[in-house]
Amino acid sequence: MVEQKMRFVTAAVVMIGDEVLSGRTKDKNLGFLAEFLAELDIHVKEARVVPDEQSRIVEAVNALRAQYDYVFTTGGIGPTHDDITADAIAAAFNVSIDFNAEAVAILQQRYDENDLNAARMRMARIPEGARLIENPVSKAPGFQIGNVFVLAGVPKIMQAMMVKLSDRLEGGSKIMSRSVRCEIGEGWIAAALEEVQGRFPNVSLASYPFYEKDRIGTNLVARSADETALGNAEAALNKLVAESEAGR
Amino acid sequence: MVEQKMRFVTAAVVMIGDEVLSGRTKDKNLGFLAEFLAELDIHVKEARVVPDEQSRIVEAVNALRAQYDYVFTTGGIGPTHDDITADAIAAAFNVSIDFNAEAVAILQQRYDENDLNAARMRMARIPEGARLIENPVSKAPGFQIGNVFVLAGVPKIMQAMMVKLSDRLEGGSKIMSRSVRCEIGEGWIAAALEEVQGRFPNVSLASYPFYEKDRIGTNLVARSADETALGNAEAALNKLVAESEAGR
């Protein structure tokens, strides 16, 4: 089994915020994180959206950090009373939370004395033992504690933080993918696809139907860390499509 | 307390599919469901994205159906081998799964005899005791079992199913919202906002910063079932903004 030699590194994402659950904000962070991490050969295996409630955040973070190699949270680290992520993470790890000298210094550099009010100072409250994550956009830092990375919710800030922290992440074996598109409904090729899957145990095959204006069809996607097997599976998919088209 | 007279109805969403976790498909279903359900005064309180793995689906569905009034799943009910939602739901409810006569009849009406192959017939496998959900787009039905509604992943099919099933849902008290937009950074008004929140215990206040090309600012949103309190809170927010602008 090729699988046993592979190192498969996993991640989960927790998106924190009533505004995503209400539909007011359409999440753009999961897609970015999934693709950014995939480039590092880290695979997002679960995501949760939770409200601005400490118990919900604690539950999600504790469930996921035990199951996956990395957890990324987005949202809830701003200056207002509904920004409770830092406190929730401290509670999840059962550590104290207080003003972090390094974070305070960053905010003092960013804001004039008059502007650095109590609300903004809240952004320097960091759980004990956490390591800061640089925020090159608006300065108020994120932080890492254990395998949990706490990021801003605003997409461009979150994305900049990911670039800054990426050297702390260690990916696994390289997973490659190949796609075969055909204008054949999923139902016509499902049996043949399952047969191909049976022949390539270390390749993962999936099918995604599409419905466009004037046509329907299916994208067949093969994924594997084994390039030879992947090439053979791709050839088998192309043969499957050719035979299905000829047989209709 | 006004809260005690209110009926607050909750929902959770489980999005099933490796393609959402890989970033290949950007989810459009959560936003739609959140807004559709909010119109019925049903509030999405949690969402999860899980891979095409039975154990993950079972875990998510069982955790959420115990906690929330309704659960909606999207994805994984097509004809291919990676479409395992129906089996996972049967496992979650610990019931058997078999061909459902009504679902078979729907597919027989949709497909010619030659076209209704074994793969497509899989779409008529429905957990015991489930009630079908009509699919006016591509016919293969969804289903409801207990408080769990199993929907297609393709947005336009899912949306059509929601319209069809909406008379099975019972909403709670009407929650209204008011928004106040200002070009003041969150950090400037956080303390004043918290003070307003303290004066309106049955109104929920939240703030959402925005960063546009040449300006930054904050949207302040008040939500409540109590229209009088909501109007008073809105007035307080407008006063807060006017005072903050005058004081800068």
Image (spheres, coloured by chain):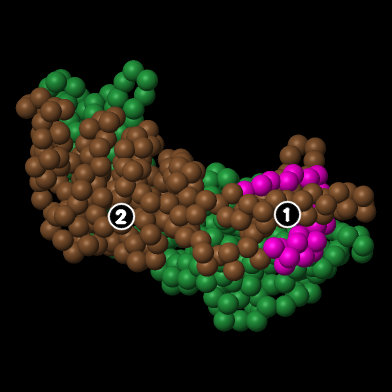
Chain colours: A green, B brown
Q: Amino acid at mark 2?
A: Val
Identified at 12% across, 58% down, the residue is B96
Q: Residue at x 47, y 67 (%)?
A: A60
- In this view, the residue farthest toward the top is A214
Q: Quadrant of residue A119?
A: bottom right
Q: Chain of mark 2?
A: B
Question: Which residue type carries mark 1?
Answer: Asn
Residue B110 picture location, percent across and down: 16, 27
Residue at numbered disc 1:
B232
Q: Is residue B180 located in the magenta-colored stretch of the structure? A: yes
| Residue B157 rendering spot, x and y as whole percentages | 33, 35
- Residue B17, given in percent of the width and then of the height, sits at 35, 48
Q: Is residue B15 left or right of residue A99?
A: left
In depth, the one of B163 and B187 nearer the eye is: B163
Rendered view: B125 above or below B233: above
Badge 1 density bin: few <14, some 14–19, many ≥20, Cα 10 Å:
few
Identify the subunit bearing mark 1: B
In the rendered image, which quarter is residue B19 located in?
Answer: top left
Q: What crowding class fits label 2: few (fewer than 14 Cα within 10 Å), some (14-19), or many (20 or more)?
A: many
| Relative vertical location of residue B26 with respect to residue A158 in this rendering, above or below | above
Mark drawn on residue B148: 2
Residue at (54% x, 60% y) in the render: A51
Which quarter of the rendering shows the C terminus of chain A? top left
Q: Which residues are magenta?
A: B177-200
Residue beneath the point at 18% across and 37% down: A190
Instruction: Give how far apart the Cα atoms at labels 2 and 1 are.
Output: 38 Å
Q: Earlier in the sequence, mark 2 or mark 1?
A: 2
Name the mark on residue A225. Answer: none
> Does residue A193 show up?
no
Quadrant where the N terminus of chain A sits is bottom left
